[in-house]
Amino acid sequence: MTELWRLSATDLAARIRAREVSAREAAAAALARLEAVNPALNAVIAHDPAESLAAADAVDAMLARGEDPGLLAGVPVTVKVNVDQQGWPTTNGLRLQRELIAQQDSPVVSNLRRAGAVILGRTNTPAFSLRWFTRNSLHGATKNPRDPAITPGGSSGGAAVAVATGIGAIGHGTDIAGSIRYPAYACGVHGLRPTLGRVAAWNASVADRGIGGQLMAVSGPIARTIADLRLGLAAMSTPDARDPWWTPAPLEGPAYPKRAALCIAPEGMPVQAEVAAALRDAARRLEAGGWSVEEVPSLPPLQEAARLQAMLWLAETRRGGMASVVEREGDPDAIAIFGFMERLCPAPALEDFQDTLQRRVTLLRAWLLFLERYPVVLMPASGELPFRDHSDVEGFDRFQSVMAAQLPQIAPALFGLPGLVVSTGLVGRVPVGVQLIGGRYREDVLLAAGTAIEAGGVPPAPIDPAA
C-alpha cells in the first residue's frame, strides 16, 4: 500500500472517511515522516505528537459514531508560526515573542480544526515574516529540500518545505507580498493567495494590524495538487465573526469565458529565459484544456502598484517605535532588510498616505475592468528562477534586483486580488512555475485554470531532501 504521507489530502480524507485507514494511522505516518526529514530542513520548529494523535483519535471517534468529522477528516496539516494556535507561542520568528502564548486559536486555525484537520506542528518564518527567504535568530534557517543552495521562499518557507517533503498534505501560509505564492514557487508545489476577506484571520495575542496589513494580508493553503488547494480553501474560508473583513462570497461564482491573457514581461521587467519558457508551456497547457490564450503586450499598472504597496507596508512599520523593536530583536537579516526598504521608500506624510489609498481605487478599477475581459491573467511568479539563498542581504544592489524580480508578487496584493502559483516543472533540480491572477472572489476560476495547467504536466510528489 502507498505510504500514507505520500497521499494527497483529497485522497487521504476520502480513505479516512471510508474507514479504509484511520486518522491515527495517517497522523502517525506524517509524524514519522516529520522525524525522518525535518532535522535536515527545519521546516517545523515546534510540535507535540501526543496532541496530534489525540486530534486524530477524535476524528476516528466521530466516524465511529456515524458523525461527519469535516472536509479534511483527519488530514495532517501544518500551521505557520505567525498565527495564534492556543497553547503555543506566536513567535513570528522573534526572540521577543518566544513567550507570547496564544490563549485562543486564530479564526483560520479554528476553521482547520472544525474541518477535521490534524495539526502536526508549527512552521518556520523569517523574523517579522518579512522576507522571501526563511531564517531567524530564534528558530534558525529552513532549507529548500530540492536544492539547499536556493531559498525555500518566504515568509511561509517552512510551510512549503513541509508540503514538498510530505510532512503534511496542506500547509497554512500567509501572504502580504508573495509569502504563500513565492515559497510554493521556490519549492515546486502550488500556493493560493485568496481574495482579501475570503479566509477569516486575526491574532488576539497582538494589536490589530495597521490599514496596510488589513488591506493586503491574507491566509491561504499550500499543497501538492490543485484539488488539495480547493479543499484547503473550502476548509479555511468558513465564517468567523472575529474578522470584520470576512466576506460571505460563494466559492463557486457565475459562468465565465475560458479566456486568459498571457503577459511574459509585464511593464518590460527582466524575465529569465527559463521563466518565459514556463509561461509559454503553461499557455499551451491551458489551450489544450479548452482555454483561449491571448498574448498581450501590457497589463494594468504593476510598478506603480508595487510602489504604493511598499509605502503602505512601511507606513505601518514606521509607526509605534517599530525601528526600536527591530533593534531590540537584533536579527541581522531583519535589520538589513528594514534598512534597505527604508532607502527604497521615504517616510510618507499624511497626504501621501491619503493619496495612496485614493490612487489604489483608481488602479484597482483598471484591473477589475481588465479581468472582465480576461478572467485569468497568466504572468510570471518571479522574473528569476528561485534566488540563491539569503542573497537579499548580500547588499543593497542585490536587494533592489530581488525586489524588481518580485514585482508580480508585490503588486497584486495592493488590490486584495487572488493569485495562484502553479508549479510546472524543474530546470535541473531548481523549480519553476507560473502565476495566475483573477478577479475578486474568483478563486474558482484560478483553480480551474490551474487544473488545466497541472493536467499538462506531472503533479509534484513528496520528495526526499537533496544532499
Image (cartoon, helix red, strand yellow):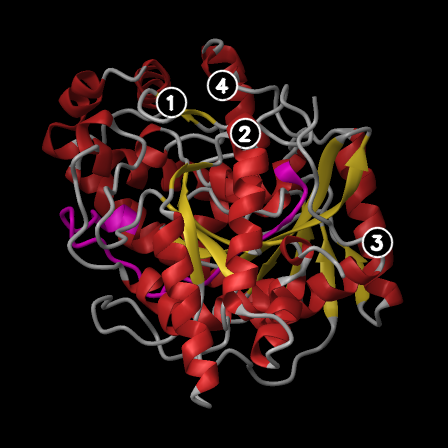
Residue at 69% in and 36% down: 464
**324 and 430: which is toward the camera:** 430
User: Is disc 4 surrounded by few (<14), some (14 to 19) or many (20+) residues within 10 Å?
Assistant: many
Point out the tag, 3 or 2, that comes first from the N-terminus.
2
Which amino acid, mark 2?
Leu
Q: Which residues are magenta?
A: 187-213
Left or right: 164, with 157 as reference point: right
Label 1 secondary element: helix
Position in image of residue 452 (x %, y %) = 78, 65
Which amino acid, mark 4?
Asp
The number of numbered badges drawn on the structure is 4
State the mark number for residue 344.
1
Point out the tag, 4 or 2, that comes first from the N-terminus.
2
Left or right: 207, with 449 as reference point: left
Point out the tag, 4 or 1, that comes first from the N-terminus.
1
Point out the tag, 3 or 4, that comes first from the N-terminus.
4
Q: Which residue is mark 3?
A: 457
Tell me, yes or no, whether the highlighted magenta stretch contains residue 202: yes
